């Protein structure tokens, strides 16, 4: 499969890149896509929500009121969950929401997501670019030149390009990542993936399990 390489102004460069069939022409595994997205979202949860039970709230050491003659129930403590300021019944406590998935399963899920993106024509190949200085305007101009206004854009770069990363940081609809870093969630969440020409090999190798440990 070949993709045409575009210039940063949106015009054709006259070049094309052949994509690896081992990544972009596999049979998608919908179940693994679901499991990987579920794992990613679960792992984003802090798990720090906490409430106090009746044994933890303050007060209740003395008898609240006399036993008889009040017309009210004989409560043993004001820490009862039925009273204002009392303990919470079955409230949340700190916990770990982490959901594990094997590296092989994650790679297959990412490849499956990319297959769907390529079928939807949701991947645009752009010649390698970098900005001299971080500037939000530069990223806006690139998005507009590629006619991606109003769309959620995932920009995948070859290696760490600080100026490009910072230029897209203030744009809600733009996410900039190194080519080996996007998760299945990132791929599916984006309407369009803008892939740098030099980042193709890095993306393919990361999915095939050949990413350099030094880069990871």
Image (tube, rainbow, N blue to C red):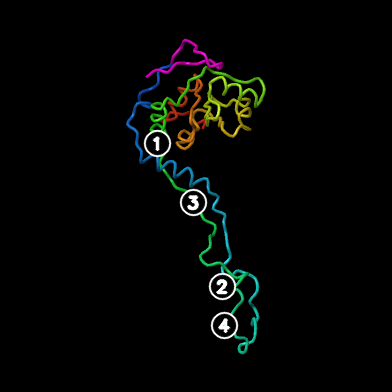
Mark with earlier residue (2, 1): 2
User: What residue sits right under mark 3 in the picture?
Assistant: 97
Q: Using the image, tell me which numbered label, if any, was put on residue 109.
A: 1
Relative to 104, does residue 97 appear above or below in the rendering? below
Mark with earlier residue (2, 3): 2
Query: 145 or 19: nearer the eye?
Result: 145
User: What residue sits right under mark 4 in the picture?
Assistant: 73
- Helix, strand or loop at label 3? It is loop
Let me know if residue 172 is in the magenta part: no
Q: Using the image, tell me which numbered label, if any, was put on residue 82.
A: 2
Q: Are marks 1 and 4 in contact (CB under 8 Å)?
A: no
User: Percent from the top left, x then y, of residue 48?
Assistant: 57, 54
User: Percent from the top left, x then y, of residue 163?
Assistant: 63, 25
Mark with earlier residue (2, 4): 4
Span highlighted in magenta in the image? 1-16
Instruction: Give the Cα separation between the discs numbered 1 and 3.
Output: 20 Å
- Helix, strand or loop at label 2? It is loop
């Amino acid at each position: 499969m070949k993709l045409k390489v575009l210039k940063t102004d949106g015009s054709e460069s006259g070049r094309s890149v052949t994509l690896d069939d081992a990544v972009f022409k596999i049979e998608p595994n919908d179940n693994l896509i679901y499991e990987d997205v579920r794992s990613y979202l679960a792992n984003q949860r802090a798990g720090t929500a906490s409430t106090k039970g009746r044994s933890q709230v303050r007060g209740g050491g003395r008898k609240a009121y006399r036993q008889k003659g009040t017309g009210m129930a004989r409560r043993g403590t004001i820490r009862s969950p039925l009273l204002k300021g009392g303990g919470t019944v079955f409230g949340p406590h700190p916990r770990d929401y982490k959901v594990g998935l094997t590296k092989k399963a994650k790679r297959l899920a990412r490849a499956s997501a990319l297959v769907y993106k390529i079928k939807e024509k949701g991947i645009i190949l752009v010649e390698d670019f970098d900005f001299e200085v971080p500037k939000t305007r530069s990223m806006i101009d690139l998005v507009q030149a590629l006619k991606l206004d109003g769309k959620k854009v995932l920009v995948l770069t070859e290696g760490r390009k600080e100026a490009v990363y910072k230029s897209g940081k203030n744009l809600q609809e733009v996410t900039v990542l190194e080519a080996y870093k996007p998760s299945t969630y990132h791929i599916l969440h984006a309407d369009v993936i803008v892939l740098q020409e030099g980042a193709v090999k890095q993306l393919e190798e990361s999915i095939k399990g050949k990413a350099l440990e030094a880069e990871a």
